[in-house]
Image (tube, rainbow, N blue to C red):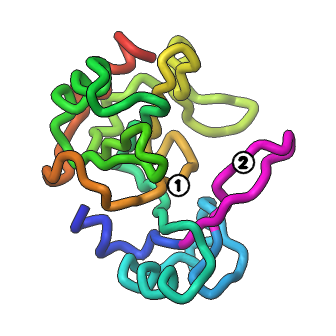
Amino acid sequence: MKELKLQKIWFLWFWGKDKNGNPTKVPISITGAKTGTNEEYRDTWSTYDEAVTALDISKAAGIGFRLQEGYFFLDVDDKEMEHPFVKMLITRFNSYTERFASGNGIHIYGKVDFSKIPTYFDEKEQKLKLAREFYLKNPHNKVEQYIGGLTNRFAVYTEDVVLAEPLKDCTQAILTTLDKDM
């Protein structure tokens, strides 16, 4: 995660409600100003150290970062560490892994060769998207796979380390996960 901590992609987040009244994570800049994951907000992002300092004096729930092209994160919800599926994913990716804030799920972070990801160009939205045959969020196994450059998302960062590996190129693991689990 060291290389991501050096980038100016960090901000705070707090719990809010989505349009249906469900809990959702809302990004906010370290100054308390509105922020988001679109490029228009780039000037509101900070360094990791600045976000940590701001977290200590704010009422935010945590810190997060905007997912950049060349990186991914895999989010597995509602599964304990001992679950065979979780263990298999940790072994498959073998990259930095942490527990989610609730302790009941994991995030795996790493690198990806964007050019090898199956995509299509959406004419209506004028952007690349993940090939239609794959889920970004699989409701059947509660796995979400986010790829920088395809998804405009931010990742919550907890530092509750499960696997203290450096960020590795996990392109093959992502392709396998798309094929078998998404």
Q: Which residue is mark 1?
A: 154
Point out residue 167 in the picture as x, y percentages from the top left corner. 20, 51
Q: Is residue 97 magenta?
A: no
Q: Nearer the viewer, residue 26 or 82?
A: 82
Q: Looking at the figure, which quarter contains the N terminus?
A: bottom left
Residue neighbourhood size for the residue with mark 2, other residues' Cα within 10 Å, grouped as few (<14), some (14–19), many (≥20):
few
Secondary structure beneath label 1: strand
Q: Badge 2 is on which residue?
A: 23
- Judged left or right of residue 92, residue 29 is right
**Residue 178, horizontal then vertical, whole percent:** 38, 19
The residue at the point 57 percent across, 82 percent down is: 30
Location of residue 74 (image quadrant) = top left
Q: Tell which circle, 1 or 2, labels the residue nearer the N-terminal end.
A: 2
Give the quadrant of residue 29.
bottom right
User: For the C terminus, which image quadrant?
Assistant: top left
Q: What residue span does the magenta drawing correspond to? A: 12-27
- How far apart are labels 1 and 2 at the CA level? 16 Å
Residue 150's x, y, as percent?
51, 40
Badge 1 amino acid: Phe
Which residue occupies the foreground of this view, 92 or 169?
92
Place of residue 18 in the rendered image (x, y in percent of width and height, measured from the top left): 79, 47
The amino acid on which the numbered mark 2 sits, given as a three-letter code, is: Pro
Q: Main secondary structure of the magenta part?
A: strand
176 vs 126: above or below:
above
Rendered view: 74 above or below 159: above
Say the numbered circle drawn on residue 109: none
Q: Residue at x 61, y 39 (%)?
A: 127
Instruction: Say above or below: 153 vs 60.
Output: above
